[in-house]
Image: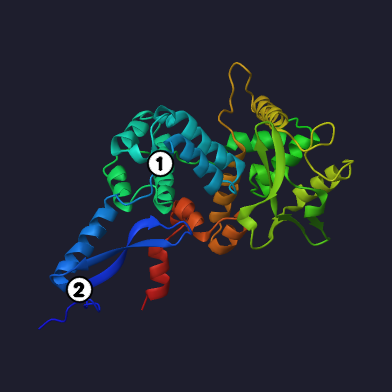
Amino acid sequence: MAKAKYSKNDRGVWETRMWDGTYNKDGTKHRKRLVSRKSSADLERQVTQLRNTLENGQYVRNTDTMFLDYARQWIETKKGTREKNTQVMYQNIVEKHLAFLEGVKLSDIRNSHFQMAINSALDKPRTCQQIAITFRQILKMAVADNCIGPGMYDLICADISLPKYVRVEKRTLTPIEKDAIRLANFTDRERAFVFLIYACGLRRGEALALSKFDFSFTRQECTVSITKALIFDCNASEIKPTPKTANSIRKVPVPASTAAFLHSYMSTLTGVQLFTCRDGSLITKSSYDKMWASIVKKMNYAAGGTDAIPVITGLTAHIFRHNYCSNLCYHVPAISIKKIAQLMGDTEKMVINVYNHIIEEKEDVTTVINDVMSI
């Protein structure tokens, strides 16, 4: 005979206590007393019923909190330590694509609200992905705060239809753009920035945050240490430690020709920062935008283009970084994937996922097998 799961108390009834999904005033879990005078099996049925009720969203704390207010609280609570650009992205999703939920209580959110948010941006598949990520993360915090039950979360997030997103293929610099770098009539500041993102593969913010103290010049080599990044908050800017190198200092070799120019450029600076506004303060968003527009314009002229008929279009600082990594990948195994990831400040997984097709292009399976396995 199977042993009963629950035992009788001193009053002769089957009893247990189970968390009902709510909390006491001191923050401890509130446990509901369940009893049966019939049998242990009857008590087990009560436990199962309460568990199902809890998972379906009942037994949560009463709250009149509005969904949008809670969403803004989520940004402040969960995204407060993220980079400013990331915070702005989430704020845009909440204030633009979830604004139609103004006046709707958090407890009243349903699956249809989620789908309506997605439908508001069907022509922008990437934005739909961001809406879905944001919506689910807000609801996950609501579950953790006991504002909605786990079962309700599953119901709200079930069968959400998203438009198909095709990732835009990253491109490298074209031969025309590479020639234009050499021929363009850059200012020294513009040339310093272009050389850093081209020859060192730095992110825009990493290059803009550099100071003289980040460089090490010796007779044998020059390296630059990447430990911080400049971020923009509207037009203002600030420098923060880059999370990509939170656990170690990332040192990137600087090619000799670039090092020689940078050494000369830094000798002309009155301050320590490589890129500043005219008054010596950190470069602002508007100042950077003007510099980048000038860089692209001068490259376009050097390539034979005009303002009316540009030869170079769609050029971004990140294309230089992609060009840097792509060129390194073409030299595997002379340089390892691990070392490329270290130079980029990324993970080996990211490098493999994005650049594996380049590595595969270099493979010569037939020759290798013939050389290694021939009898």
Relative vertical location of residue 355 with respect to residue 238 in this rendering, above or below: below
* Percent of width and height locating residue 366: 38, 63
Q: Nearer the viewer, residue 200 or 4?
A: 4
The residue identified by callout 2 is 13
Q: Quick one: which residue is furthest to the bottom in this view?
A: 1
Look at 45% across and 40% down and name the residue there.
Answer: 169
Relative vertical location of residue 274 with respect to residue 119 in this rendering, above or below: below
| Amino acid of disc 2 | Val
Q: Nearer the viewer, residue 111 or 32?
A: 32
Instruction: Look at the numbered disc 2 and give the secondary structure of its residue.
Output: loop
Badge 2: residue crowd in 10 Å (few <14, some 14–19, many ≥20): some
Instruction: Look at the numbered disc 1 and give the secondary structure of its residue.
Output: helix
* Percent of width and height locating residue 341: 57, 58
The residue identified by callout 1 is 135
Quadrant in the picture for residue 307: top right
Badge 1: residue crowd in 10 Å (few <14, some 14–19, many ≥20): many
- Please state, as top left, top right, bottom left or bottom right, where the N terminus lies in the image: bottom left
| Amino acid of disc 1 | Phe
Query: Which is in the foreground here, disc 2 or disc 1?
Result: 2
Q: Is residue 184 left or right of residue 34?
A: right
* Percent of width and height locating residue 365: 39, 63
Q: Quick one: which residue is furthest to the left in this view?
A: 1
Kindly tell me whether residue 43 is visible in this rendering.
Answer: yes
Look at 48% across and 36% down and name the residue there.
Answer: 69
